[in-house]
Image (tube, helix red, strand yellow):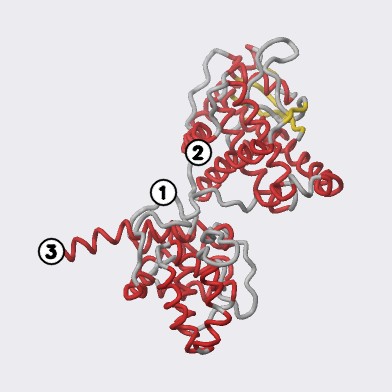
Amino acid sequence: MEIVRSHRKSSAGGPVPTLSFYRSAPPLEVRLEDFELFAMDRLRVLHGISDGLSRGKKATEMDDLVSELWREHMRHPDTTEIINKDIISHFVLRLVYCRTEDLRKWFLSMETTLFRSRFRFASAEAQIMLMNECELPLKALTHDEFKDVKDELGQVARSINQPLPTADDSIFFKIPFEEVPELVAARSVYLRKGYGYVAVNQVVSLVANQFRSHLSKALVLTNRKWTTTIRELEKDRLTPIVEGLSTRYLGPDYSQPKEYAEISLKDIDQIARSSFSLCMRHLFYKLREDHHLKHGGRMQLGLFLKGVGLKLDDALAFWRAEFSQKVGSERFEKEYAYNIRHNYGKEGKRTDYTPYSCQRIITSTPGVGDHHGCPYRHFSEENLRAALGNMGVTGRSVDDIMEKVQNRHYQLACTLTFEAIHSCPHDAGINHPNQYFIDSRKILQPKADSVGGS
């Protein structure tokens, strides 16, 4: 697979920064394994950024978060490989996220935030190289110009808590005001005769806007190439990878319970009330109420129960007790028992099926009579408020959750639900119903043991 990379030296012979506009580069042979693994590592960075933004982190907090995420997922002992991984992963994800407007919008926002933070951490030399590449109409102030506007620049600096301007007039530039709409909107730039006067530490907004504009256009062009040629040419090799990456769950699969590794049938109702996420709690009580679930619901709840430690024999007994009330024992054995054993890897291909992640549940499309899917996405506001109330979530917490739902931050809404119920923060965020269960038991089990011991 040919993809682009950056040279280690510029045309002038000097070093090229690892941070770039990803415009173009020489072709590079990439192993299929690296094609996918590099993209997954970058996705971990972008998802971390998305979570930080949805939690309302400030710019300085986002910079620290991006630095930590980049160091954790994109580092490599070989400097050349760091550059290659950065470039490769970006262009792979362009293919992944060019395919729909929603995907393009998310990728554009996350990559711009990533670029902005990385630019701030870049060396002065790297920043200057990128500024030159942007060809921004920046003009350094002359000494006389600086003296003429120094007082006004000081007022702006004080209003945005920046250091006051000094006699070093090279740290300020002037630029046509239409190039700095973000700074104008934030009232963080002095305007005079059609020009905005910006400090060097404000240039990041200008460069990031150029990056965003370039990437936005590039995503549209990539989509055209993908739909007209690449998708069909690579249908047996790259297309399945590309089309699966945007919904790929990147955490533990919870196929084999490692913590709280066994739950008892006699305790399942109590555990469901205290430690099931809303999606699983809803399915559990619908099963108790109707004594039946359609296929999607059986898969979502059944694999979850397997992941939290319900043994095969207990699972058969659990489902048999409910379904027999609706369809009878004989029909249960003929039509449903096989699928339960199949999920546990005891029939068919003997595959060890994994519980569904939040991402898979959110993107499912339940139909009429179905109860699977994500309540934060699929419930009406009235039904969601009622469901949260039944879990014991009330007051301001409900309003905060509904705000996240309205902004389509469904996993963060689930995280806020967890925090409201357990009265403690959950900084990692909820990404999987089985993670919700384990983290809940970690909090509640010590309390139960303490009560029992006293």
- Mark 1 → mark 2, Cα distance in angstroms: 14 Å
Q: Which residue lies furthest to the left in this view?
A: 454
Q: Residue furthest top?
A: 13
**On residue 62, which mark appears?**
2
Depth-wise, is mark 1 or mark 3 nearer the camera? 3
Of the residues shown, which amino acid type is indicated by label 2?
Answer: Met
67 or 350: nearer the eye? 350
Image position, residue 354 (x, y; %): 52, 59
**On residue 445, which mark appears?**
none
Q: Residues within 10 Å of mark 3 (few under 14, many from 20)?
A: few
For mark 1, what is the residue? Answer: 427
Q: Residue furthest right?
A: 228
Determine which quarter of the picture holds residue 363.
bottom right
Image position, residue 106 (x, y; %): 65, 48
Where 33 falls versus 288 (above or below)? Answer: above
Tell me: 281 left or right of 181: left
Image position, residue 288 (x, y; %): 45, 82
Of the residues shown, which amino acid type is indicated by label 1?
Answer: Asp
Q: Residues within 10 Å of mark 2 (few under 14, many from 20)?
A: many
Q: How crowded is mark 1: few (under 14 residues within 10 Å), some or many (20 or more)?
A: few
**Residue 246 in view:** yes
Which type of secondary structure does the marked residue at label 3 adopt?
loop
Kindly identify the residue that appears in the image at 59 percent across and 36 percent down.
114
Depth-wise, is mark 3 or mark 2 nearer the camera? 3
For mark 3, what is the residue? Answer: 454
Which type of secondary structure does the marked residue at label 2 adopt?
helix
**Residue 159 in view:** no
Which type of secondary structure does the marked residue at label 1 adopt?
loop
Are the residues flagged by discs 1 and 2 in contact, CB closer than 8 Å? no
